[in-house]
Image (cartoon, rainbow, N blue to C red):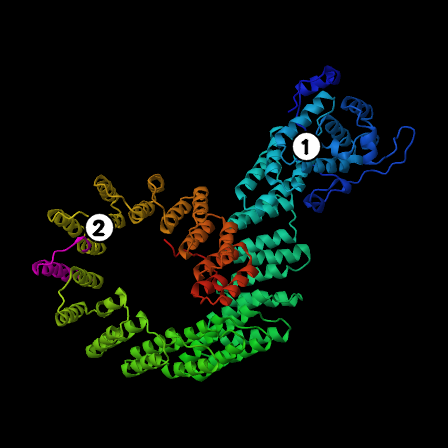
């Protein structure tokens, strides 16, 4: 690094006096202007190469040296040392063009831009004349691109040092051109550092250069840093121009602080500024988001009167959408008519919002009139608009009109999503029109949407609605279309008949499945057994069980527990226990501890705590000793029933029987106290299990971490996480999800991001819950760009985002004013086969963007 200590030959006393008594480089009350030929396009362009730098084409004269090639220079002039070059340059300091041509002759540009004294002397000379401003600017751009790792503080010191040693005045233009060079090389971090260095030295940057930094920071969502830069400028009495104001307003909108954007606009107006159309448009968007619709309408009028031109389609659309969300359809229509009156075509977004507003107001006729008028005026509805119309007509059971619009959609070549087909079929079935449903499904097959999965979903829908005849017709069509029926298809039909209490047909479907050599699965037997029990047909239920046993089907525990679980769900755990006891007696089997455990657990699921306790006592009276699992079920049941005193009593009884609590039992107790927010007791139990030599598993840690998270004590939660890592206990997805959720709520985005990176590094696949936590947490902390990346990350991993995740991202785009992207994601969601809920409509239509469904 160069210093101010150098040879005295270049430091005349007058220069030393000036440096010792230095004043600010610029005392101008506003931003200085850049070169006359400077433009935003130039400032935002990429770094120029050596061949792109344009130097004056000067005619050689007696004091002009001829231009030669770089190759010749390297062969002729390499022996000219820097001292000699600097001496000649200083002799021509009052003739910058001559100095530039001399350098071009004596040194290749690649060597000049290495940052040695020759380069800085040349820069000081070039910034002394308007004729060579652009040359200095371009050379600094080349210098920055050639020295990407050179810190701005070093460069600024070199500029200062060279000015002092070689007798130049401290021209702020050189520093501003350096700031511009970092901007043009897309080095926002260096631009910010350079800006701060200039401010420390009382150099006032040019306004376009500051705006470029602000623009880069706003685009990267570094809003706080952008505001710091602006506040520093305001602190010295410089407020910027219209572009500065626009950038600050955009920053506030990105932070979802429309009130702040409105206040910025009002402050600028109070200073007598003359806003342009873009500033007005941003102010209108901000007013719509506050919402302050009176202000938005006033700004629309003021914009027309002051600028003499109507607002843009986008501005009008923002107001229309905001008015519809407020339920002010009359004013929304008036604004739409005003826009059309100026010859501005209504956007699809505005039309969709108005149509949805009519639909929500149960004015389907007006919605249909607007829809028809749009088509007549040449505005082609998109898939979203068609979907909105169809879904609302289906919701209002106007299936005839819904089918008509569906056919118009197909006529213009728009392929419906599988979700829309599902909605249409569901609507047709609701109005007792299964023929229409099958017709739509047939059309769906022609478009290639009728795959086996969709067929089974439609079949499941028909079965759930009790449309058994339609379901039977669908099965026939599947066979005719070559779509293979599988066990799932038959299971759905059996389930439908069971729900209709037509067990004879259910059993006949079971027989057909066997005839077609399809192996029943556990779900098949569970459906039939559960169906017979629910119909109080115990004989046939046991017939199915006996048939299952005789077929030597290797049933899982789930099948054997279906008898108990099915009756427990129907509130008949006692009857299930009686049937099981009879079965054991007929088979000569004795009641096992495991069987009692299942029955006790069943009573707890029904909330019959007393019955569970009686069963436990009966178990002991019958000479069957309860095991650790029994006590674990009891402790867990009491904890879930909020009977912690009984849970502790079971713990004492275990000790009396010389049974040691195992990890699941401790986990149940710890989890119970954590949910009651009694963390002191939970921590005490945690210490106890460790003293007994038990190793806590991830479930124990998860309960404790979740308990501290719920109390907002993330420090204790993080300490537990560190202990897990130190003890070699692998964190699971729930651990990371809980920690990330708490950290995001606590505002610790950096640690949360580190943990998410750890999840990916460990090869743990994030699930929907984690993505929801990330999307909601980042969105609420103003990190919407990062939240949007979560959605893209899911899609890259071929993971289908849930409706909740789409809702959060759509809400973010809506807050940002990105209405096109919001509706595009809505259409994408429908295409992926996701069934939208009221939240999506609230976001796109009513503007309710509060997404918080993950605790």
User: Where, quadrant-wise, is the N terminus in this rendering?
Assistant: top right
Q: Which residue is mark 1?
A: 175
State which region is magenta: 607-629
Could you say which quadrant of the image residue 65 lies in? top right
Label 1 environment density (alpha carbons within 10 Å; few <14, some 14–19, many ≥20):
many
Q: Is residue 30 visible?
A: no
Tell whether position 483 is magenta: no
The disc at residue 666 is: none
Q: As drawn, which residue projects farthest toward the right?
A: 62
Element type where label 1 sits in the image = helix
The prevailing secondary structure element of the residues shown in magenta is helix
Q: Nearer the viewer, residue 624 or 250?
A: 624
Could you say which quadrant of the image residue 510 lies in? bottom left
Label 2 environment density (alpha carbons within 10 Å; few <14, some 14–19, many ≥20):
many
* Image vertical order of residue 742 relative to residue 561, above or below: above
- Going from N to C along the chain, the mark reached first, 2 or 1, is 1
Tell whether position 617 is magenta: yes
Where residue 487 appears, as percent x and y from the top left, is 37, 74
Q: Which residue is mark 2?
A: 665
Where residue 372 appears, as percent x and y from the top left, is 58, 76
Which residue sits at x=48%, y=65%? 327
């Amino acid at each position: 690094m160069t210093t101010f200590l150098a040879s005295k030959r270049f430091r005349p006393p007058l220069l030393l006096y000036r440096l010792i008594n230095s004043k600010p480089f610029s005392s101008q009350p506003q931003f200085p202007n850049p070169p006359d030929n400077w433009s935003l396009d130039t400032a935002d362009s990429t770094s120029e190469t050596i061949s792109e730098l344009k130097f004056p084409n000067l005619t050689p004269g007696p004091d002009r040296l001829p231009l030669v090639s770089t190759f010749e220079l390297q062969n002729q002039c390499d022996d000219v040392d820097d001292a000699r070059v600097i001496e000649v340059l200083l002799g021509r300091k009052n003739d910058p063009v001559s100095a530039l041509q001399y350098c071009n002759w004596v040194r290749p540009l690649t060597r000049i831009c290495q940052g040695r004294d020759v380069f800085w002397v040349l820069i000081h000379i070039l910034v002394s004349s308007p004729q060579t401003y652009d040359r200095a600017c371009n050379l600094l751009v080349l210098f920055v691109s050639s020295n990407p790792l050179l810190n701005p503080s070093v460069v600024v010191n070199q500029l200062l040092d060279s000015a002092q040693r070689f007798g130049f005045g401290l021209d702020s233009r050189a520093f501003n051109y350096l700031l511009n060079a970092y901007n043009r090389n897309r080095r926002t971090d260096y631009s910010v550092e350079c800006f701060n260095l200039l401010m420390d030295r009382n150099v006032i940057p040019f306004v376009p250069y500051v705006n470029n930094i602000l623009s880069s920071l706003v685009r990267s969502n570094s809003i706080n840093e952008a505001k710091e830069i602006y506040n520093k400028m305001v602190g010295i009495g410089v407020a910027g121009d219209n572009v500065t104001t626009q950038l600050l307003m955009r920053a506030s909108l990105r932070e979802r602080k429309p009130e702040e954007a409105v206040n910025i606009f009002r402050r600028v107006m109070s200073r007598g500024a003359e806003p342009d159309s873009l500033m007005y448009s941003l102010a209108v968007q901000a007013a719509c988001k506050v919402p302050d619709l009176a202000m938005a309408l006033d700004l629309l009028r003021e914009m027309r009167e002051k600028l003499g031109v109507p607002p843009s389609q986008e501005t009008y659309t923002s107001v229309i959408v905001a008015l519809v969300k407020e339920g002010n359809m009359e004013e929304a229509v008036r604004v739409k008519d005003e826009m059309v009156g100026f010859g501005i075509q209504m956007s699809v977004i505005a039309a969709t919002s108005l149509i949805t507003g009519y639909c929500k107001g149960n004015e389907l006729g007006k919605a249909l009139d607007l829809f028809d008028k749009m088509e007549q005026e040449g505005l082609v509805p998109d898939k979203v608009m068609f979907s909105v119309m169809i879904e609302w007509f289906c919701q209002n059971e106007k299936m005839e009109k819904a089918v008509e619009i569906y056919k118009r959609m197909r006529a213009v070549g728009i392929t419906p999503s599988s979700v829309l087909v599902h909605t249409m079929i569901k609507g047709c079935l609701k109005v007792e029109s299964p023929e229409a449903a099958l017709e739509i499904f047939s059309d769906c097959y022609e478009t290639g949407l009728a795959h086996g999965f969709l067929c089974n979903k439609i079949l499941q829908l028909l079965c759930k609605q009790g449309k058994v005849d339609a379901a039977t017709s669908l099965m026939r069509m599947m066979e005719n279309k070559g779509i293979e029926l599988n066990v799932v298809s038959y299971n759905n039909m059996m389930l439908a008949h069971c729900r209709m209490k037509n067990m004879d047909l259910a059993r006949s479907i079971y027989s057909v499945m066997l005839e077609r050599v399809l192996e029943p699965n556990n779900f098949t037997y569970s459906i039939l057994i559960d169906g017979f029990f629910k119909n109080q047909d115990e004989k046939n239920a046991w017939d199915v069980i006996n048939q299952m046993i005789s077929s030597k089907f290797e049933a899982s525990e789930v099948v054997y527990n279906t008898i108990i679980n099915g009756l427990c769900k129907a509130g008949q755990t006692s009857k299930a226990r009686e049937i099981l006891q009879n079965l054991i007696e007929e088979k000569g089997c004795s009641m096992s501890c495991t069987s009692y455990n299942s029955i006790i657990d069943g009573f707890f699921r029904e909330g019959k705590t007393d019955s569970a306790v009686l069963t436990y006592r009966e178990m002991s009276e019958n000479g069957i000793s309860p095991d650790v699992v029994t006590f674990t079920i009891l402790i867990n049941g009491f904890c879930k029933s909020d009977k912690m005193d009984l849970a502790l009593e079971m713990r004492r009884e275990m000790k009396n029987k010389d049974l040691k609590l195992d990890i699941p039992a401790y986990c149940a107790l710890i989890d119970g106290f954590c949910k009651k927010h009694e963390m002191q007791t939970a921590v005490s139990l945690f210490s106890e299990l460790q003293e007994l030599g038990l190793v806590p598993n991830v479930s124990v840690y998860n309960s404790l971490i979740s308990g501290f998270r719920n109390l907002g004590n993330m420090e204790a939660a993080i300490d537990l996480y560190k202990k897990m890592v130190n003890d070699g206990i692998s964190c699971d997805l729930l651990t990371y999800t809980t920690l990330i959720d708490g950290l995001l709520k606590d505002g610790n985005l950096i640690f949360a991001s580190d943990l998410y990176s750890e999840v990916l590094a460990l090869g743990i696949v994030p699930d929907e819950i984690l993505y929801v936590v990330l999307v909601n947490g980042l969105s609420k902390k103003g990190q919407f760009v990062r939240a949007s990346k979560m959605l893209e990350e899911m899609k890259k991993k071929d993971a289908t985002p849930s409706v909740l995740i789409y809702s959060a991202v759509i809400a973010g785009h809506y807050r940002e004013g990105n209405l096109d992207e919001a509706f595009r994601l809505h259409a994408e969601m429908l295409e992926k086969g996701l069934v939208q809920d009221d939240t999506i409509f609230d976001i796109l239509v009513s503007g309710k963007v509060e997404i918080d469904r993950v605790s």
